[in-house]
Structures are given as C-alpha cells and as structure tokens.
Amino acid sequence: MMPLSNRLAARRLMAVSSASVLLAACGGGDDASGVGREPTASTSSEQVAEGAAPASAELVSIDRLREMRAEFARIDMAPDVAFLTEEEREVVNLLVDAASLMSEIYLWQLSPMNPATRDEISMIGGERGKLGLDLFDLHFGPWDSLDGDAPFYGDSERPDGAGFYPPDMTKEAFEAWIADHPGDAEAFRSGYTVIRHEEGGGLVARPYSEVYAEWLEPAAAKLREAAAITSNESLRKFLNLRADAFMSDDYYESELAWMDLDGPIEVAIGPYEVYDDRLFGYKTAFEAFITLRDPAESAALEKYKGLLKDMEANLPVDERYKNFKRGFESPIAVVTQVHGGGDNVPGVQTIAFNLPNDERVREAKGAKKVILSNVLGAKFERILSPMAEKVLVPAQAGLVMRDYMSAGTLFHELSHSLGPGTIVKNGRETTVAAELQELYSRTEEGKADVMGAYNILFMMDRGELPAAERENFLATYFVGLIRSVRFGIEEAHGAGAAFQYAYFREKGAFSVDEGSGLLRLDFERLEQAIMELTRDIVVLQGDGDYDAANAFLETYARLDQDANRIIATLTDLPVDIQPVYPARF
C-alpha cells in the first residue's frame, strides 16, 4: 500500500529530523525520558557498519536517474475541501501533522541507516545529486522499488527484514532463538515489536511504543488535540483510543472504534501492513490516510456489503474452505485523499485499502473498504486507459472502462474479507497469514484480484451489474494485470498479478496476435480460468501449506517473453503517479 502526502512537507520533515537522528546515532541527546533513543538503543556500532553504504558509495548514472524519475508522473492534487467547516479544517490540519510523523517512523522502519544515507546524498550537488535526493524521497530509501529494490546509491542490498530485525538476521537464526527461548515467541512474532541485538550477543524484542517514542508521543498529542476539537463523537473516540494505542501497543479497541467512524473525515493512522517484512511478514509498518468521504458515492456501494455472505457461499470450493466466522458489516467508503504518511507515501500509490488486518476485529465486525477515488481516477487517465491499445488488439482495447477499474478495485477489497482467515492446522488454531509467513502478502493480493473478478461476474449473473458489459470488465481487469506487473514481481501486488497472467496463459485465456504482437483475449476461457484460479488459491490458503504456496509462486509468479516484450513498449507511459497535496487546508 502506498499513496498520498505532500511530498514537499515530508521532505522538509526528513531534512529537519536527519540532523537530530544522526546526533542520536552518535550517542547524543540527554532526554531522560528516552525520547530519541532509537538509534543508540536499537542499532549497535556493528549494525551501523553492516547497514551503512560504503564510504565510496556513488549514485548510478544520471541517465539511469532520469529514467527512474520518469517512471512516476508528478500530479498536483487539488482536493475540494470547500464543504468543510472551520472546525473540520483544523482537525484535518492536525491529522496532517500526525501523518507526517508516520513518515518519520517509516523511514526508520525501512532502514535505520536511511537518515544518514539521505544526508550523504544531499551533499552530492548538481543535477545528479538533486535527482538522487528526489528519488530517495520518492522511494524512502536508496533502493528502486520498481526494479527489485536494486540500489541506486551504493551497493548495499535492502535487507529482507528491513529495519525490523538486525541486518544479518536469517529465518533460521530467528527460529533457533525462539526454540531455545520459547517464552520469547509471542513478543518476537508480534506485529508491534522490533528485534534487536543485546550487548551480550543475544536478541530482544522491543515494543514500538518504546522504539519510536520520539515520534509516537507527539503524534498521540496531535490526535488528542484533534479529538478535543471535533464535535464528531465517533471520530473523537477513535482518535483518543488510537493515541492510547500508540503508547500501549494494544490496537484492538481502537480498531473496533475505527470501524464505527462516521462523518466527512475518514482517517486511518497507525501500524498496518506487513509487506516490508520479507523475512516473515510479521512486522507492521506505520502509515496514514487522511481522506474526506463522498457520502453519495459511498451510499451507492453500500448494497454490496449486504451481499458478502452470498459471495462467500458462492466460492467454488468445498464448504470447509468457506469462512462464515468473519463479521459481514464491512462498511464501504468512497473518499478523496488529501494527505498521507508513512507506508502510504513512497513508490506505487494505493488506490484502495481494506483494514484492519487483525483477524479478531474481522471476525467481530468485518473490515472497512476505502476507495481513494481521486488517486484511482488519476491512474486511469494517465496510465491504464492509454495502456490498453498497447496491450490488447484494437477490437478489445476499446472495451476498457474506468467504471470497471473502480469496480475491480472495490471487489478486490471486498474479497480480502472472503475465504480462509483463521484456520485449524494439525489440531491447532492459527491463521493463513501465520502459516504462509512472508508468502502471504503475495498470495493474498493475487487472491483478492482474481476472487474480485469472480465476484463481479457473479454480480453480473445476479443482475446487480450489467451483464452486457461483461467483456468491458474482463478487458479492463486483464489490462490492469499488466499495469500491476510493472510494479515489479518482487512486490506483493506485482507478484499477485504475475501469477494470474501466467495461470491464464496456461489455460489458453489469451493468445498473441501474429500480426501485431498484441494480446487477444478468449473471454469464455478467461472466465473459466478465473473460476479455477479462485478455487486453487483459496484451497492453497485454506490448507495453510507453506511449501505448497512456495511451489505455486515459484511456478506462476513469473513473466514470460511476451509479457516482458509488451512491458518494454510502455516506456512512454509512467509506471505510477506521485501525487502532491497541499500542505495545509
């Protein structure tokens, strides 16, 4: 996930913070409360040496930097806030401040060396240095997120564990420690702890509330200040509970309160997604979405949450793989994004999200689906619409419709709430995410895509969506897969799209036109393949079989020659957008 935020504001914040962060890394700072201690407490001198770029680190060529910059189209977003009251504007501005603090935390979560690396790049100067700094801020680090995290400054590889674990941490070492210290298992696998070396050579799990106190404490203060101002009771309750959670690492009550948010301001802020933990998929990254609800558009989609049980019942799998334990309240919100923070800012931008991820909350109240309409619209106009003619034969390229990019996005998010969640394996209760570990995000994003397509076809069969537009949907869905694989197949959404493409090719759902080299869809076979892949991925997740999931991804999460050839023709189109939002409202 990764959308909004005022890039300039985030950049200024990072520049201001880098100096204090570097001082703290050298042991500076005398705050007895421990605020600002993350570098000294969690990063030993050996870790800094391992994680730092070498003294001879250089940026890649200026031509490569220019190519990377062109992959993202800067778009000045001008969200309409005229309908907000003065009170609501003041609340939004406080939330913007809190969101920017999420960016500070996320910079550290990706790598404790990020502030120092940014400082080095800032001293290079000239066009090359300016581009390097711009790209660092775009990706939140010296790694190109569209190129398998290849470094564009220095040659240090991005650790699979990001900044959540020591840079030399392996899965084997982590599991061996737990085997020898079973009392540490819960804390080590928690989504809200950071694993660090102790001075004696051991390992310790430190809570987020302690590690990131420098930013969480002022963020909590901003939330409480906003809560004191707002007259919206549901927003006040959520903001106060989320501020408490920043200090306690217990997010359950605030997640329940978030599900009940009502009013024009829709805000998600806190530690959510686990994409950046590529060791295990345990550790959550901080992010923020500051958005304004469109009540008419939201109401128009409300009917679909009432059909979630029917969608679950219609899944093409045995009954034991169906999940009726989850709550089906699942509010749907169509919103305009006005700012963001943390994991929501860098790289590929989020067009929708489905939260919370806590299975306890999902079973109690479902999950909220939020569609970021202004971000989605910008991507359709700048990327997906012009891409169609470069992917599909002319007779099919014209079928692509924005309505079905929107519908596909909605049903992707709805489908995150369907299928196995809590499962029983070898007589013990567990979750799909716990069993598939770092493979979960890739299987889940692909599952949500293909199951979303399956459910749209189901809605057309029921008359909830126009059956006459079946081919419009299928063409839009398929071109969307090509759009997603450009994110890189190492990334969860890109990998999910890649395994759909490969599976559909194996099933004969499309072919290559000999004359043009473009792709021609066989709509009947594509529908059949969508059903079969939905079945296969639900069973794979429901079995909680790590080895089977790994074998599936090894087989299908890859691109063939034709996919790479078509992707190579898209260089005149941006891979994604970089929205720039106003600093204040």
Image (cartoon, grey):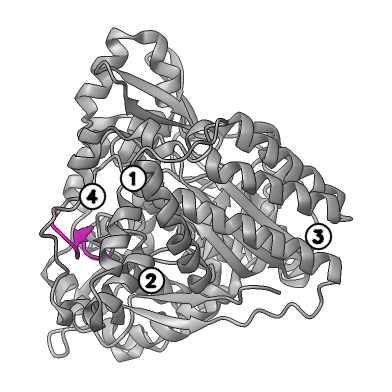
Name which quarter of the figure residue 230 lies in: bottom right
Residue 549 shows in the view: yes
Would you say 38 lies left or right of 532 here? right
Could you tell which of marks 2 and 3 lies nearer the N-terminus?
Answer: 3
Please tell me whether mark 2 or mark 3 is closer to you in this view: 3
Which stretch did the figure color magenta? 146-155
Task: Quarter of the image for the N terminus: give it.
Answer: bottom left
- Is residue 378 depicted above or below 166 in this figure? below
Percent from the top left, x then y, of residue 112? 34, 45
Q: Earlier in the sequence, mark 4 or mark 1?
A: 1
Q: Is residue 485 above or below residue 444?
A: below
Residue drawn at (32%, 66%) of the image? 136
Observer-nearest residue: 266 or 441?
A: 266
Q: Secondary structure at mark 3?
A: loop
Check disc 3 and give the amino acid type.
Answer: Gly
| Neighbours of disc 2 within 10 Å: few (<14), some (14-19), many (20+) | many
Instruction: List the residue tagged with mark 2.
Output: 480
- Identify the element where label 1 is drawn: loop
Number of the front mark, 2 or 4: 4
Write down the residue under mark 1.
Answer: 112
